[in-house]
Image (cartoon, rainbow, N blue to C red):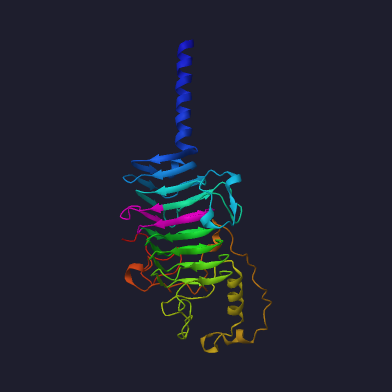
Amino acid sequence: MKNSFIHISLIICAAAALFFQAFGERPVSGIIDRETRWKAEEGPFIIEGDLLITKMANLVIAPGTQIIIKSDAKKAFLAAPFDKVDSAMVSIRVFGSISCVGRRSNPIIIRPEITELAKYSWYGIILDEADSRYTEIAFTEISGAAAAVTVKNSTPMIRNNALENSNIGIRCVGGGMPKIYNNLISSCFTAGIKIEKSNPQIFNNIIAFNNNSGLWGDNKSKVAFKYNCVFGNTDRNFFECDPDLGKLTKAVKDKDSTDANGNIVADPVFIGSAAEAKAIEIDIMLKTDSAKVENKKILNLPNLPFGKPKYKEVTKIGSETRQLSKYSPCINAGDPGGSFKNVDGSRNTMGPIGGQDFLSK
């Protein structure tokens, strides 16, 4: 009887261990050299050291998966120059392929343990000659990196992401030619997007409220930059870029002014922002056309005590305030091409809420 009890106890302990391994935190690091899948229910995944995906390997990350970068506070840096970043910082380097594709209502989250504003404690995702046929980062929230995504000598799809609170949002170097569509790139320190000897396609993004530059070019690369909203980047919206970028043409009636490539320089107007509060206040104060009022008596009512709407400023990643207000100039202002249309068939809306759920390469 005693032996049976011990045997049963061992089985229970083993089962419990398997349960917590399957449904608790899962530490990962080292080399991935084969087809590997990470599922949300198996995480969160704790990356404790460099992760390298070899040339023939593929990492598939399912919607809703949470990935936490184990941070060493001593190796975190505060707004240091990116090019002098400590090589000891944890990175996810991809020589093979990675499919990091969430869903609009169920994004993938990649964040560090250290979440202090402007403190960057991991290197980021590096697509280094990655297999572009199978590499895509979409509907993913990435924060706290030296560069959230670095693209080198490859042509991956990077779309519908929220890349916030990093030193650089997307860095294109050494022949990197990514397709960068419908992202929100905000609250980064050095630049939203930095380009060095690369030729990316950058359409339908919101690049706003970064600490220094929105788009930092090199005056050499050929960049297709169309139908983006670039605004409120503290130092400048464009640095070392085509001088015509952001040079607004005459506005069409009832439309915001754009440059020759359909880019707008205007507040994207997020829900809960000061810009929305101002728009609501103006909307309330506008006089209603009497021809549109059926009950003429209401025109003679005294002014009602409307107060200024309360608002909160845009905050860090994970905030609901990244949703566009109905007053946003970004709505239905993206590339009018058919492949970029919204799910409901309307013209593309800039930022992560716009475009298709699935986009062919």
Closest to the observer, 127 or 10 = 127
Q: Is residue 145 magenta?
A: yes
Residue 231 visible here: no
Relative to 228, does residue 156 appear above or below in the rendering? above
The C terminus: image quadrant:
bottom left
Residue 198 visible here: yes
311 sits left or right of 349 in the view: right
The structure residue drawn at horizontal position 65% and vertical position 68%, both measured from the top left corner, is 310
Relative to 87, does residue 214 appear above or below in the rendering? below
Q: Position of residue 355 (x, y in %)?
A: 39, 65
Closest to the observer, 167 or 8 = 167
Q: Position of residue 272 (x, y in %)?
A: 59, 66
Q: Is residue 201 magenta?
A: no
Give the extent of the magenta segment: 127-155
Closest to the observer, 28 or 287 = 28
Q: Position of residue 154 (x, y in %)?
A: 35, 57
Relative to 102, does residue 215 appear above or below in the rendering? below
Relative to 98, does residue 332 appear above or below in the rendering? below
Residue 222: image quadrant is bottom left
